[in-house]
Image: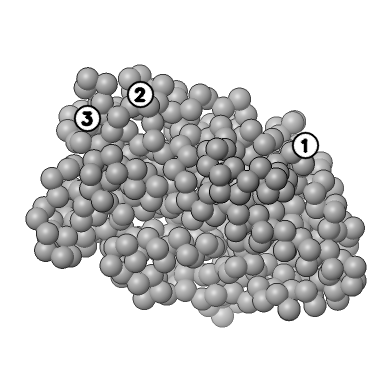
Amino acid sequence: MSLCGVHQHGRLSPAGQLAAKSPEGAPLAEKSVFIVGAGMGGLAAALRLSGRARVTVFDRAPRVGGKMREITIDGAPIDVGPTVLTMKWVFDELFAGAGAHFDTAVPTTRLDILARHFWRDGSQFDLFAEDRAALDAVGDFAGREEADGFLRFLGEARRIERMLRDSFLRAPAPDMAAMLRAAGPFQLLKVDPFTTYWSALGRYFRDARLRQLFARYATYCGSSPFKAPATLMLIAAVEKAGVWAPKEGMAGLARITAQLGMERGVIFRLGEGVAEVKLSSGRATGVITQSGERLDADAIIVNADAAAIASGLLGAAIAGAGPRMPNARSQSAITFAFSAATSDAPLDRHNVFFSDDYKAEFDSVFDRREVPRQPTTYVWAPPSAGDGAQRLFCLVNAPAGTASADKARARMIDHLAACGLSLDIKSAFQVTPQDFARDYPGTEGAIYGAPSHGWRATFERAGVRTRIPGLYLAGGSVHPGPGVPMAALSGMAAAKCLMTDFGLT
């Protein structure tokens, strides 16, 4: 599918008008819903509401996808945001609800190797998707005892994921009572909310490299494994359930989702931000655009960082609708997209180059608020065109706020070389925390909302309903948390709550 119009036109009303009736031929929906933000949460909410309400999506950017974006290097696109698709069941459900088949709409390749890992001592380890291959690889890499520990770790991660999928991940808000009803108090305590993730990993792995490898999952929600709860081991189960590479990239996934929404009547107004959400008699009743246009609607879904609401960036009237401003911010990142000739280290699609001192990294990011001296580096290496140049996307962790890209780049290149990867860089594109702060207001450059530090953090995230009737939230800074599938779940939950409240089910 092509979505060239989403890039080129602020208003896509022609496509919307052509799809003004639901696929079943039902009359035009009576309720009008505005969605502020065309990131994955907003796109999922729009698609779920399509055919049930008149949906308009606003975004100040000229494209859909939020942090799911791409640039062109050597004449080919490369993702410079999220690069992996996990929890595919979320998108199977989302597309099926719109009468589409995800595998047909979004061709993907399921990866055999989840990631290739490198260390400065010359170690290299592939984590396989298939259980038997993964278990054998751990045994070959670190011994039989570590393989036994991996098997126990994976079993526990899967148990936690099964327990929390319906009672937590699908829920519209973090609800301790609902989780207790679903799992019982004794089972719920077994998700390890009071133990740090790093400490819990010590129960399963003596090999520091494996402990480091699985501790990295805490960074998927912008957190330190030394402060986050052990519950985050469920991410290991999520990855082992499958990692997919969309043919058109993750940015392509956003475009295709928007295209399907347009075919079902959704209107996109891109390059047109919202300055304020209007209230009338205590209800959300519309928006004022940045150009001053006043528009009425029956309900609003805000798919923006919850901090933008709390700080009044969408109007003082709704500032109290979101959660209080977090005392701490998640980590940010400095990212680079290169065209480079590589040598020595054989790259797979997803690669991680680890530092020697993992704790020192997180102390740098969260306590000293500086770029680590030896930054663990994620390298996304899509298949090469075979012309000798390799397109690479590289990411290092950094504190929210201000960070030096030049310093990060120099340290990263030195670290990669120490791990065996030499780069002859031809061209480069970079994004810093300052850029994230500019592009995503209210975040201060943090890209995951608040960090998941301590057991209370989970329950301090805002739910998708607010105290203002007709106003709902979506996105990675609200429940159930950051990441593309989690943002999609928040948008689906917001749409479900809205439909329930307005009798649209």
Q: In which quarter of the image is residue 15?
A: bottom left
Amino acid type of the residue tagged 3 in the rendering: Thr
- Mark 2, mark 1: which one is toward the viewer? 2
Q: Name the residue under label 3.
A: 285
Residue 154 image label: none
Give the position of the N terminus as an image quadrant.
bottom left
Q: Under tag 3, what secondary structure? A: strand
Q: Quadrant of residue 428?
A: bottom right
Label 3 to label 2: alpha-carbon separation = 12 Å
Question: Closer to the camera, 254 or 279?
Answer: 279
Residue 431 visible in the picture = no
In the rendered view, tell whether residue 268 sits above or below residue 36: below
Residue 249 position within the rendered picture, expressed as x and y whole percent measured from the top left: 46, 66
Q: Name the residue under label 2.
A: 318
Q: Under tag 1, what secondary structure? A: helix
Question: Closer to the camera, 4 or 363?
Answer: 363
Please report the residue visible at 74 percent of the width from the left and 52 percent of the height from the top. 215
Q: Quadrant of residue 25?
A: bottom left
Q: On the rendered structure, is 496 left or right of 243? A: left
Residue 363 image label: 1
Amino acid type of the residue tagged 2 in the rendering: Ile
